[in-house]
Amino acid sequence: MAVPPPITPEAVAHLRSLPTDGDRNQYVAQLLFMYFGFNDEWFAKHVRPKGMRNLLGFFRLRPDLGNSPQVTGRLCGFAENLWNLSEPTIHGFPEALAGWQDKAGEGEFNEVLLAANLKRWTVPFWFHINTDGYNYDFDAISVGGDVVAVEAKSRETGLVRNWAKLRNNKMGPASRNQLPCDRPGSIFVQIPEEWVSGDLSDMQREIGGLFSSNSRVVSVVFFWITAIPKGNDIQNIVSYWEFKSAVHKFDKSKKWDIFGQGRPQSTDWMSLQSIRDYYLNGRF
């Protein structure tokens, strides 16, 4: 497990002076953002609601300034994910980080979230650096031990389910063409949590249509986030559905799915709370 980045004695003193664990978690998230180059200028451009003057202000739960536990929890999770993805064994992280620093949107949050969950579920992967003309996000090792190109799509919005719209917007030709022609590919799409119950016949029809119209896609993964309140904080739990194609053009004797029936969870994941306690215990 990696050792968290060093901080100053003044930062530790401030951390200890904060009244609640929620406040301390938010301050540690701020320190990690600073460590990775997400400074006040970045927050002013991409994240901070109007009227917030500094980064620490954003992490205070101030509804009158447009903040909320959901937003704060999401950004704390983003900081935790960044730290766990920064280990040297994950190829391409510096290049991916530079892209996240350059812009900030649903797609960037989504890419970090997906990468973090690949690591959490011990899926070997690396960030794809676009030197081959294909602009997908990751290369991951399938359950069968082969490389699969992974394209991550940003969240489909709207509480009213529309699987046909999702297929066209998130899994249409533009998305599929980001995947290599000569290698198996998988598309990951975030969906609203409200979409995962009730009649799913429309979803099954659209997935079948996608597979039958594109032989390079071996699987589709839908994932969604459940926000669980924990005191003043929000814990985000990620769940997923994985659908496998039976009509792709690759070796059908192989297992091309990414998650399969479940992989073991990582034992070296470091939570934001663990990083906080590392500093509070004087190991800095």
Image (tube, helix red, strand yellow):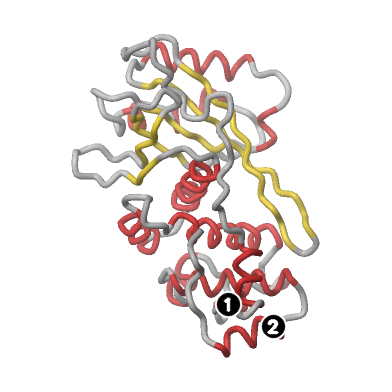
Q: How far across and how far down the image is residue 259, in percent?
A: 52, 29
Does dot 2 land on a helix, a strand or a loop? helix
Q: Amino acid at mark 1?
A: Arg
Instruction: Place residue 214 in its image quadrant.
Output: top left
Task: In the rendered view, tell whether residue 233 sits above or below residue 263.
Answer: below
| Separation of residues labelled 2 and 1 (CA atoms) | 13 Å
Q: How far across and how far down the image is residue 28, in percent?
A: 59, 72
User: In which quadrant is the C terminus drawn?
Assistant: bottom right
Name the residue at 36% across, 57% down: 88
Name the residue at 68% across, 57% down: 70
Q: Which residue is mark 1?
A: 283
The reply, left or right, for residue 70 in relation to residue 241 is right
Front-most of residues 235 and 160? 235
Task: In the rendered view, tell whether residue 165 sits above or below residue 281.
Answer: above
Q: How far across and how far down the image is residue 225, in percent?
A: 64, 43
Q: What is the crowding at mark 2: few (fewer than 14 residues within 10 Å), some, or many (at least 20)?
A: some
Mark whose residue sits in front, 2 or 1: 1
Q: Which residue is mark 2?
A: 16
Front-most of residues 239 and 109? 239
Name the residue at 63% across, 36% down: 239
Q: Amino acid at mark 2?
A: Arg
Q: In the displayed orientation, state which residue is furthest to the right.
A: 231
